[in-house]
Image (tube, rainbow, N blue to C red):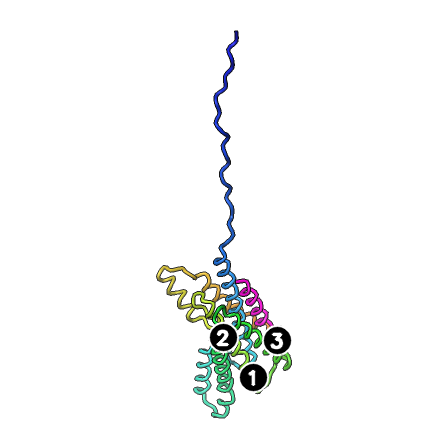
Amino acid sequence: MTAASTTAPTGPPARPGPRRRDHPPSPARAAHRRTDLALLLLTLAAGVTDAVSFLGLGSVFTANMTGNLVMVGMAAGRGGSWTEILHGDVLRCTASFAGFTAGMLAGFRLPARTGSAALYGTLVLHLLFLTGWAATGADPGTAVGAGLILVSAAAMGLQTAAARRMGRAGITTTFVTGTLTSLVSGLAGGDRTHAGLRTAVLAALLAGGVAGGLLLVWAPPVAAMVAPAATAAALLLRGRA
């Protein structure tokens, strides 16, 4: 008689652990990313626009109004006849102030839901500027130049209103002194919230200025194409936000 072989009881087979899945970002986070990218594109456009206006339209800014105040003061301080001053820097800076203020006022009076309405207006004005810039061979005279300054500044005013409506870290895309102040004060206090975005905005403005300056040297007609292209791309991103 042989002993029956016995086998140790076995429990149920071990179940594999749950697989780790990479969850897609939440809709709110994805919308914020698209908004941030749109702001960077608009800041790039502002940098190019200021480079084109300063180097191609007679030393005037159409996005940075603070610089225009300094330019007017310098023009008055270095002497010369008032006729020359009033028909030179003052004329150009006044056109820029008027256009920027009108554009910003219109932008803030448009529907406040997303800022897209102001961006559509910005795109139209960029295209109008491009038409005038191309028609003059990227070398407008005094009268046409003043008109282009007015149009460009109005576009930047609308863009400023649109950026404020996006409500991301107080970024305006056209002047970045406040962005720099917020970045440095936050880092000094140990608050890194929006530090990456603010740093990227500063870099985008610098990149836009470099691109605008290079294009004016090597391909002047193309220099005015960057802003409408960047604005159109921002609009596409906002449409998905």
Q: Mark 1 points at which residue?
A: 147
Q: In this orientation, which residue lies closer to the viewer: 57 or 105?
A: 105
Closer to the eye: label 3 or 1: 1
Compared with 79, 214 (above or below) is above
Q: Which of 73 and 98 is in front in this view?
A: 98
- Residue at figure coordinates x 61%, y 75% from the top left: 220
* Label 3 element class: helix
Q: Earlier in the sequence, mark 3 or mark 2?
A: 2
Is 22 located above or below residue 205 in the figure? Answer: above
What amino acid type is highlighted by mark number 1?
Gly
Q: Give the range drawn in magenta.
A: 222-241
Amino acid type indicated by mark 2: Leu
Query: Is residue 138 in sight in this rendering?
Result: no
| Residue at image mark 2 | 110
Q: Where is residue 200 in the image (x, y as percent from the top left)?
A: 48, 63
Q: Residues within 10 Å of mark 1 (few under 14, many from 20)?
A: some
Please name the residue that numbered disc 3 is placed on. Answer: 220
Residue 227 placement: quadrant: bottom right
Report the side of 92 relative to 219 (left or right).
left
Q: Is mark 2 on a helix, strand or loop?
A: loop
Number of numbered discs visible in the structure rendering: 3
Q: What element carries label 1?
A: helix
| Mark 3 nearby-residue class (10 Å; few <14, some 14–19, many ≥20) | many
Q: Is tag 3's residue or tag 1's residue first in the polypeptide sequence?
A: 1
Reply above or below: 179 against 109: above
Q: Nearer the viewer, mark 3 or mark 2?
A: 2
Q: Distance between the residues labelled 3 and 1?
A: 18 Å
- Identify the amino acid type marked 3: Pro
Residue at left offset 55%, top offset 65%:
239
